[in-house]
Amino acid sequence: MPWSWAALQQVQAASLKPLALCLQAVTLHATAAAGGGGGAGVGRLLDSAISHAYRVHQFVGGLDAACVQALDALAPLWHAAHGTTAQPPQHRRAESTQQ
């Protein structure tokens, strides 16, 4: 079956914009639901969004800055929904640039 590797790279790159939009929509929904006591549904929504982001990350081979920023915005909401107080780990890229 003939295949164009350039087409795969275009599909991979195009996958990041919908992911960033999805994560932003989940953040808005979770923020609104947190004020109204969304409960376990918000936690499951956040888990699904993070799982989806991981799958896209594996397909694409990484995330762009918009996706990383959207995931950073989800972190406090995820911790609040799951009742954890742990701080999210810092990104290795940020650590390497500080040296």
Image (tube, grey):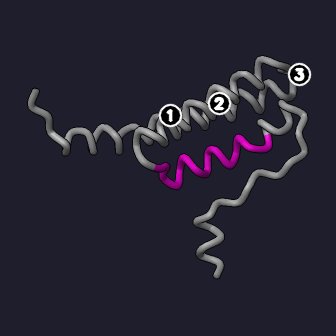
As shown in the figure, which amino acid type bears the numbered disc 2? Val
User: Gap in Å between the C-alphas at discs 2 and 3?
Assistant: 16 Å
Verify CB contact (< 8 Å) between mark 3 and mark 1. no
Helix, strand or loop under label 3: loop
Residue segment shown in magenta:
62-76
Task: Specify which label sits upstream in the sequence, 1 or 2.
Answer: 2
Residue 20, label in figure: none
> How far across and down, in percent of the image, does residue 85 sit?
90, 45
Confirm whether the magenta stretch covers residue 75: yes
The total of numbered circles placed on residues is 3
> Badge 1: few (under 14), some or many (20 or more) residues near its Cα, within 10 Å?
few
The amino acid type, in three-letter code, at marker 3 is Gly
Q: Residue at x 46, y 40 (%)?
A: 58
What label sits on residue 26 in the rendered view? 2
Q: Give the foreground label among 1 and 2.
A: 1
Residue 17 location (% of width, % of height): 44, 40
Residue drawn 74% across the image and 29% down it = 30
Judge left or right: residue 14 versus residue 36: left
Q: CA distance from mark 3 to mark 1?
A: 29 Å
The x, y position of residue 44, in whole percent, is 72, 22
Mark 2, Cα crowd under 10 Å, few <14 / some 14-19 / many 20+, is: many
Residue 36 higher or lower than 86, as above or below: above
Q: Inspect the image, locate mark 1, and give the three-letter code of the amino acid beneath it.
A: Arg
For the residue labelled by badge 2, is the local secondary structure a helix, a strand or a loop? helix
Q: Which mark is residue 37?
A: 3
From the viewer's perspective, is the residue at label 3 or at label 1 nearer? 1
Residue placed under numbered mark 1 in the picture: 55
Q: Residues within 10 Å of mark 3 (few under 14, many from 20)?
A: few
Front-lying residue, 44 or 36: 44
Q: Residue furthest front?
A: 1
